[in-house]
Amino acid sequence: MKIRGRIFAVDDDELIVTMLARALRSEGYEVHFQTTPQDVVANILSWQPDIVFLDVDLAEEMTGFDILAAIKKEGLEAAVVMLTADDSAESAIKAMKLGAVEYFTKPFNLDEIKIITGNIIENIRRKAEIDYHRKNSCPYFEHGLVGESSLIAEILRKADKLVEAKAETILITGESGSGKEVLARHIHCQRQKAEAVGQGPFFAVNCTALPENLIESELFGHVKGAFTDARSDKKGIFELAAEGTLLLDEIGDMRLDLQSKLLRVLEERKVRRLGGSVDLPVEATVIVTTNKDLKTAAEQGGFRKDLFFRLSAFAVELPPLRERGDDILLLAHHFLRYFANKYLKKGIKGFSDEAERAMMSYDWPGNVRELRNIIERCVVLEEMETITRAHLHLNLAGWAAGELPASSRIILPEEGISLEELEKDLIRQALERTKANQTKAAKLLGISYDTLRYQMKKFDLA
């Protein structure tokens, strides 16, 4: 049974805490209890619970209110539930003012305790997920894995097998922009449906985006005083992901010392906060992605071999867009419909035959991300019913051989050339040849009028 949460119960009546512990353990919680006030604050802090049940009338020298005030002062984020034989409103108000989230009068109903505990755990996890995404501006999952090619069909079949096998760690490789995070989110959604546990959290961490001095704390969490700026306890993302999914992006760039710690977490399915003394269970599915050749990196010493072998057990490789055939047009039309609806451009209906041929012959070095961005730009800037090849304004360096006539080909000098200066000069020549007629100049260059205006402003030619 998966551990739903960690609970610390404090009551001087051993019968009550044993009964409470038995009931909550049967629901999948890990429970630790104490019947005396001796070192109770230190014990609670070191055990790092999600919920603390506190008896108000524990002892004269240290009441439940004293313990509640002390752990809140220490910055413990755990939810606190007070237990008491005193049903007065004054006592309840005092508990809430000190930071308690619930207040039960003895004798209490165990079924009610179970329901309230489940709600508190769910609220804790939802709040942590929302706070994380608000802080890190995580992009919304706008598009699923779109594609009908045999390559994508095989990848989806493999993903379903991994979900069915309940694989705990999955490696997704592929070029930048090929859709690795999209596939990770697809696996996450399928896993949640298969296990019927609702929509668990999805956390995505870019291993290169976080400062080196913060990534370890971000992943594993820390306890108060673990380092200079650790002013309170903090849960790491491995904890926050709970029964959801944790995506570690660009794993190939992770420091070797962190790779060692990550391997331990993946092997033991436990994590320890920085400065902590307790091993906490890791319940999340861990998906790692990279655009690097990890096997070569491992052979050259840039990546741990033992971690590579651990990750490669369940690996999926995404193909580049240029190898996906008709998926290119399928995706183009998908993005066109999406952005036309988003930007209220219902007048844009589709692509010309020439534009479709151009997209099929283009090399797409930026893969699906590049296609998505180009279609979005066309929808925003153009007002035409049909998007033409000129509107796409693809990078000419990426066209397949034969798309440009030999007479139009520019031979690259040995010493190199400035593309910006070349582009500026061609725009200037077009304007001179058409006597500053911008519509004709745009047609001469094979670009839209709006694109020409943008380029003229960019190069100060307006």
Image (cartoon, rainbow, N blue to C red):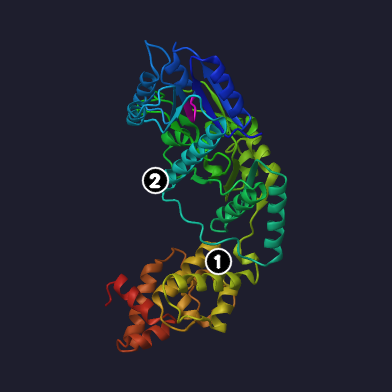
Q: Which residue is mark 1?
A: 364
- Relative side of 278 to 162, left or right: left
Secondary structure state at the residue bearing disc 2:
helix
Label 2 crowd bin: few (<14), some (14–19), many (20+), radius 10 Å: few
Q: Position of residue 83 (x, y in %)?
A: 45, 24
Q: Is residue 175 left or right of residue 276?
A: right
Q: Which of these two is toward me, 393 or 409?
A: 393
Neighbourhood count class around disc 1 (C-alpha, 10 Å): few under 14, some 14–19, many 20 upward: many
Residue 287 vs 408, above or below: the answer is: above
Residue 255 in view here: no
**Magenta residue span:** 48-52
Instruction: Kindly identify the residue that appears in the image at 57 percent across and 57 percent down.
Output: 179
**Viewed as shown, does residue 285 lie left or right of 411?**
right
Residue 190 counted in the magenta span: no
Front residue of 295 and 328: 328
Q: Quadrant of residue 281?
A: top right
Q: In the rendered view, would you say 352 is above or below 297?
A: below
Secondary structure at numbered mark 1:
loop
Q: Mark 2 or 1, which is nearer the eye? A: 2
Residue 327 at x, y percent in the picture:
63, 69
Q: Residue at the spot x=59%, y=32% of the render? A: 265
Quadrant in the picture for the C terminus: bottom left
- Residue of label 2: 135
x, y percentage for residue 130? 44, 46
Q: Which corner quadrant of the image does residue 100 belong to? A: top left
